[in-house]
Amino acid sequence: MAVSKSRLDASRFFLRLAIGGLAILLGFQAIRHSGFPSTLHAAGYWGMHILEMLCGALIMVGFLMPFASVVLTLIIGFPIVMGWIHGASILGDLHALFLLLVVSATALGGAGQWALGRE
């Protein structure tokens, strides 16, 4: 069954809202629960989560979608891959793995017609 263009654009729009909103909330929650950075390591942690919130906002509005999706995929995927390298099981963190797959699908699907930066 073929999907109409308007239904496909609506699904991309809601997917962008969900992924972007979740990235903003997760980044904000991580910053809120950590203290002000006093070391270079803590400053890098803050910077990574600020970048996560920025990419989430870009995804929500559909601007610079390929860039924001790739950066968000790297931010989410890096801890997963590092865990695998250090002996964690492949399905050890299902929440992060699901998030990685959904962000990758957003990157592949594109922004759609209802976006600021159309393809």
Image: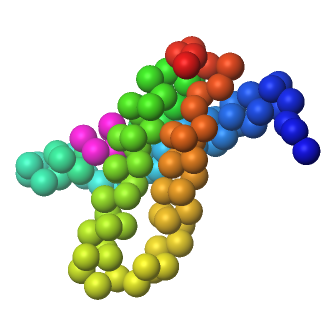
Rendering quarter of residue 110: top right
Q: Is residue 65 left or right of residue 70?
A: right
Task: Decide if residue 72 is in sight here.
Answer: yes
Q: Quadrant of the C terminus?
A: top right
Q: Nearer the viewer, residue 22 or 75?
A: 75
Q: Position of residue 24 (x, y in %)?
A: 48, 40
Rendering quarter of residue 49: top left
Q: Position of residue 40 (x, y in %)?
A: 8, 49
* Residue 48 is inside the magenta segment: yes
Q: Nearer the viewer, residue 88 or 35?
A: 88
Q: Tell which residue pokes out farthest to the front in this image.
A: 1
- Going 44% across and 31% down the picture, which residue do you hit? 66
Q: Is residue 1 left or right of residue 103?
A: right
Task: Decide if residue 21 is in sight here.
Answer: no
For the image, the number of numbered tags is 0
- Going 31% across and 59% down the picture, which residue do you hit? 78
Q: Is residue 98 left or right of residue 54?
A: right
Name the image colouring: rainbow
Stretch of the chain drawn in magenta? 47-51
Q: Is residue 64 above or below residue 76?
A: above
The secondary structure making up most of the magenta span is helix
Q: Nearer the viewer, residue 2 or 102?
A: 2
- Going 39% across and 41% down the picture, which residue do you hit? 70
Q: Is residue 85 above or below residue 74?
A: below
Q: Nearer the viewer, residue 98 or 118?
A: 118
Q: Position of residue 74 (x, y in %)?
A: 34, 50
Q: Quadrant of the N terminus?
A: top right
* Residue 50 is inside the magenta segment: yes
Q: Position of residue 57 (x, y in %)?
A: 49, 30
Q: Is residue 17 left or right of residue 107?
A: right
